[in-house]
Image (cartoon, rainbow, N blue to C red):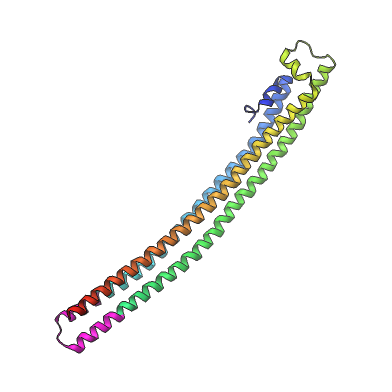
Amino acid sequence: MFVNDLDYQKLISVNPDRTMDLQEEYRAKFEVIVNELRHFALKKRAEMNEELNAFNECLKQTKKETDGECVKMLDDYSHLKKKLLRILQSSRDTKEIDDSFRILKEETMKLSDELMSIEMQVAEQYEDVIKEFERNYTEHASSVTEYGQSNFARMRDIENEYHERFSESILMTFERFSKGDLDDIDDDLRDILSDKDALLNTVNGSHDFRLGRFDHQEDCLVSGVAQDLESLTHKLHDVEVQRDRDRVCEIFTFIDKCNADIENAEENA
């Protein structure tokens, strides 16, 4: 931060010993806050990952349970369908044939309704789970934002304190220069100290540069957390919408095939 501050680089030579002491004190205080913020952010990231893993495991378990239920229903239906189709192929009894067709159509419709009902329940459960996850994840994200903003406020306090003491040091040297108490100074330093207004503008410019860096980094933190939250929640909703569409398409395709098989059997009965 100091290395990229061109105004600050011009001022180092004004009172180098005092400036280095202030900078080292600044660095030590600043490092404490940065480490606290880093540790808090890493801790929260771990908690957010745990929250996401728990969410995915919950969805996985729900899908496993409902898939098992649906597979059993499909197996039972397929067994009944094969049995009835064999009857239709071999029977010469009109009533038996009519009853078989009736049962087959009723069971196909029943299967369609049950599969769609289960999918509706799953969609509702997924929606509830996603809402709960969003609440928990948002709380974690908000805590990172709030803690970050609090720490950046502390950084600005340190910067303001440093700026005040640094300004005093620079003005003290300027007063000595004005009184002719500085000997053997080079031309560059003489140029810096020859104009008080320009000197103060340079000091304030250095201060503004560092405050601007804080503002930028804080914006990056806040916007980054917000974008991560928005991206994740949108992704979860998009995945769920696609999953629901795929499952409904699977059900329709399967039922259409069953109805086609029944129609074909009717034509050949």
**Residue at 48 percent of width and 59 percent of height:** 237
Q: Nearer the viewer, residue 247 or 53?
A: 247
Where is residue 4, by image quadrant? top right
Residues in magenta? Answer: 79-106
Main SS class of the magenta portion in the image: helix
Quarter of the figure that contains the N terminus: top right
Vertical order, 83 against 9 (above or below): below
Vertical order, 77 against 52 (above or below): below
Q: Nearer the viewer, residue 142 or 245?
A: 245
In the figure, is residue 163 to the left or right of 86? right
Where is residue 243, by image quadrant? bottom left
In percent of width and height, residue 191 lies at 75, 17
In the figure, is residue 183 to the left or right of 267? right
In percent of width and height, residue 196 lies at 80, 23
Quarter of the figure that contains the C terminus: bottom left
Q: Nearer the viewer, residue 96 or 171?
A: 96
In percent of width and height, residue 154 lies at 69, 41
In the figure, is residue 212 to the left or right of 66? right
Identity of the residue furthest to the front in this view: 267
Vertical order, 49 against 31 (above or below): below
In magenta stretch: residue 213: no
Residue 51 shows in the view: no
**Residue at 47 percent of width and 68 percent of height:** 124
**Residue at 64 percent of width and 49 percent of height:** 146
Residue 104 shows in the view: yes
**Residue at 63 percent of width and 35 percent of height:** 31
